[in-house]
C-alpha cells in the first residue's frame, strides 16, 4: 500500500498552502529516537506565529525489505516540504518512521501516541492535535481517531484499508494464487514461498520477467483482472492492469512473510472463495491453491479492525478504482459509522471516481483537511484562497466550499484561520 506521489503533491502543494512559506522558515530539531526505535522529527514555526496546534503526518506503507527511516519521498515534492508549509500556516508539525517497516499499523499507532507526548515535553501541550494519514497511515489515523479521542482532535484518512482488514489480506493473497494458475512457475518457489532474492530485487524482477509475460497475453491478463477483481482504468486497460499487477504481487511476494510473522500465523483463507472471470473461471476454481487461515492470525487481525465509533471527527476520501486498497473499504466503514449513529455527525466520506491509489487532486485534499477543522469547530475561514489556488482550480474549490459550508476569502493573508483567532 505504497503512497503515490500524486497524493503527496496534493497535500504539499495546495492542501496546506502552495505558497512559499513566510520569510521566517520552519525550524526542525535533529531527528531523534523514540524508545521503540522509531525515528521522529519535530518542526516548529517562529514562536510568534505558532497557533498552538499540532499536525502529525502518518506516512504510508514501506516494504518490509526497506530499513526503518522517515520516508522522505512522502514529505517533499518538487522541493516543497510539509514541514515548511504546515509551519508557514502556524501549525507545529511532527512525523516519524514507525518502529518497523512492513506491516506496522499497531506499532505506528503506538509510536504516534508517543510522539504526541514527546512533542508536549519539548514544545508544551498543544491545544489541538490533528492527524493526517494516507494508505497505511490512513488506517492508523482511523484507529487512533476512534480509540484515542483524548489525544486526537480530528483526522483525515485517505485511501486506507479501514473497512475490513481481513478482506485486504485476502485481496492480495488471492491475486497471487490466481496468478499462479495462469502463469505457473513465472514466480519461482510457489505462492508465499518465493526466493528472498526476488523480494530483495522486486522491481527488476517484475519489469524484466513478469511485465513482458503480461503484455504478451492480454487475454489471459483480462482473465486475471476479472478473477482477482483488480481495479483498472477502462480508458487505459493495459497500462493500469500492469500497474495493478505490480502492486498486488509486490505485497504478496515482498511483504506476506512479514505479515505472517507480525500476525502470528498465515493470515487468510479461501476454501469457500468462488472466483469469477471471463472464460477460465472453471479452470481457475479447479486449479487454484486452497489455503486456510491460522486461527491465531485471525484473532490477532481483530486488533486491526475499525469500529466506526467516533467521538472526534474523521474525514475519509478514497478513489473508486484504487488498485492497492480497494474501494470496498469505504462503504463498509460508512456502514459502521451509520450503525453507530456517527455518520454525518462525526464521519464524512468523499468518493472520487477514478483509477489509482491515493489519486486525489490538490483541491480535494485541501477540502478534506478544511472539513475536519470545520467538524472540530476549529475553522473560521480560509483567507487568501485566490492567492493559494491557481485560477484553473479556484472554481472547483469555490463550488466545494459552498457545498460543504466552508467560509473563505479570495484576498488576504493566505492561511487557514482557526476559530480562536
Image: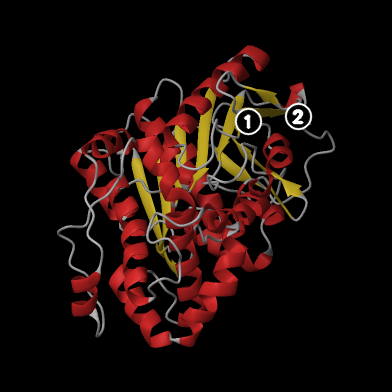
Tell me, yes or no, whether the two marked residues, 2 and 1, touch with CB atoms within 8 Å.
no
Name the image quarter holding the C terminus: top right
From the viewer's side, name the closer residue of 408 and 176: 176
Number of marks in the rendered image: 2
Above or below, 87 relative to 134: above
Q: Distance between the residues labelled 2 and 1?
A: 9 Å
Residue under numbered circle 2: 28
Res. 355 in view: no
> How many other residues sit within 10 Å of disc 2, few (<14), some (14-19) or many (≥20)?
some
- At 28% across and 72% down in the image, what residue appears? 227
Residue 295, percent from left and from top? 21, 38
Residue most extreme to the right:
23
- At 65% across and 38% down in the image, what residue appears? 70
User: Which dot marks residue 18?
Assistant: none
> Looking at the image, is mark 2 or mark 1 earlier in the sequence?
2
In the rendered structure, the answer to whether residue 109 lies left or right of residue 288 reads right
From the viewer's side, name the closer residue of 358 and 62: 62
Residue 400, percent from left and from top? 48, 58
Residue 308, percent from left and from top? 28, 38
Above or below, 17 relative to 32: below
> How many other residues sit within 10 Å of disc 1, few (<14), some (14-19) or many (≥20)?
many
- At 50% across and 57% down in the image, what residue appears? 358
Give SS at disc 2: strand
Residue 286, percent from left and from top? 18, 73
Chosen colour scheme: secondary structure
From the viewer's side, name the closer residue of 188 and 122: 188
Res. 195 in view: yes
Query: In which quarter of the view is residue 323 placed?
Result: bottom left
Residue under numbered circle 1: 94
- At 55% across and 22% down in the image, what residue appears? 36
Give SS at disc 1: strand
Amino acid at each position: 500500500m505504497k503512497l503515490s506521489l500524486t497524493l503527496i503533491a496534493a497535500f504539499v502543494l495546495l492542501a496546506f498552502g502552495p505558497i512559499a512559506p513566510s520569510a521566517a522558515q520552519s525550524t526542525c530539531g535533529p531527528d531523534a529516537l523514540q524508545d521503540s526505535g522509531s525515528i521522529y522529527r519535530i518542526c516548529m514555526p517562529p514562536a510568534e506565529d505558532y497557533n498552538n496546534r499540532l499536525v502529525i503526518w502518518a506516512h504510508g506503507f514501506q516494504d518490509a525489505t526497506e530499513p526503518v527511516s522517515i520516508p522522505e519521498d512522502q514529505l517533499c515534492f518538487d522541493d516543497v516540504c510539509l514541514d515548511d508549509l504546515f509551519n508557514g500556516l502556524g501549525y507545529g508539525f511532527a512525523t516519524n518512521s514507525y518502529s518497523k517497516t512492513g506491516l506496522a499499523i499497531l506499532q505506528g499507532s503506538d509510536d504516534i501516541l508517543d510522539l504526541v507526548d514527546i512533542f508536549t515535553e519539548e514544545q508544551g501541550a498543544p491545544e489541538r492535535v490533528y492527524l493526517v494519514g494516507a494508505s497505511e497511515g490512513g488506517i492508523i489515523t482511523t484507529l487512533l481517531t476512534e480509540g484515542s479521542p483524548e489525544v486526537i482532535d480530528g483526522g483525515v484518512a485517505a485511501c486506507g484499508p479501514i473497512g475490513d482488514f481481513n478482506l485486504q489480506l485476502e485481496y492480495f493473497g488471492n491475486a497471487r494464487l490466481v496468478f499462479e494458475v495462469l502463469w505457473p512457475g513465472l514466480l519461482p518457489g510457489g505462492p508465499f514461498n518465493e526466493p528472498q532474492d526476488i523480494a530483495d530485487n522486486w522491481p527488476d524482477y517484475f519489469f524484466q520477467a513478469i511485465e513482458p509475460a503480461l503484455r504478451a497475453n492480454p487475454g489471459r491478463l483480462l482473465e486475471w483482472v476479472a478473477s482477482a477483481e483488480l481495479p483498472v482504468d477502462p480508458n487505459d486497460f493495459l497500462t493500469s492492469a500492469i500497474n495493478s499487477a505490480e502492486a498486488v504481487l509486490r505485497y504478496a511476494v515482498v511483504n506476506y512473510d512479514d505479515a505472517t510473522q507480525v500476525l502470528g500465523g498465515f493470515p487468510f483463507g479461501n476454501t469457500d472463495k468462488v472466483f469469477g472471470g471471463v472464460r477460465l473461471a472453471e479452470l481457475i476454481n479447479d486449479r487454484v491453491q486452497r489455503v486456510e487461515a491460522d486461527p491465531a492470525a485471525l484473532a490477532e487481525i481483530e486488533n486491526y479492525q475499525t469500529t466506526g465509533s467516533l467521538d472526534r471527527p474523521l474525514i475519509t476520501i478514497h478513489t473508486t478504482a484504487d488498485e492497492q486498497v480497494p474501494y470496498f473499504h469505504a462503504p463498509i466503514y460508512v456502514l459502521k459509522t451509520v450503525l453507530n449513529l456517527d455518520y454525518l455527525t462525526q464521519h464524512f466520506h468523499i468518493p472520487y471516481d477514478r483509477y489509482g491509489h491515493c489519486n486525489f487532486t490538490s483541491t480535494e485534499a485541501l477540502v478534506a483537511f478544511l472539513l475536519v477543522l470545520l467538524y472540530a469547530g476549529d475553522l473560521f475561514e480560509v483567507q487568501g484562497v485566490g492567492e493559494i489556488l491557481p485560477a484553473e482550480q479556484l472554481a472547483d474549490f469555490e463550488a466545494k466550499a459552498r457545498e460543504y459550508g466552508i467560509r473563505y476569502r479570495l484576498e488576504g493573508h493566505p492561511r487557514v484561520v482557526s476559530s480562536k483567532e
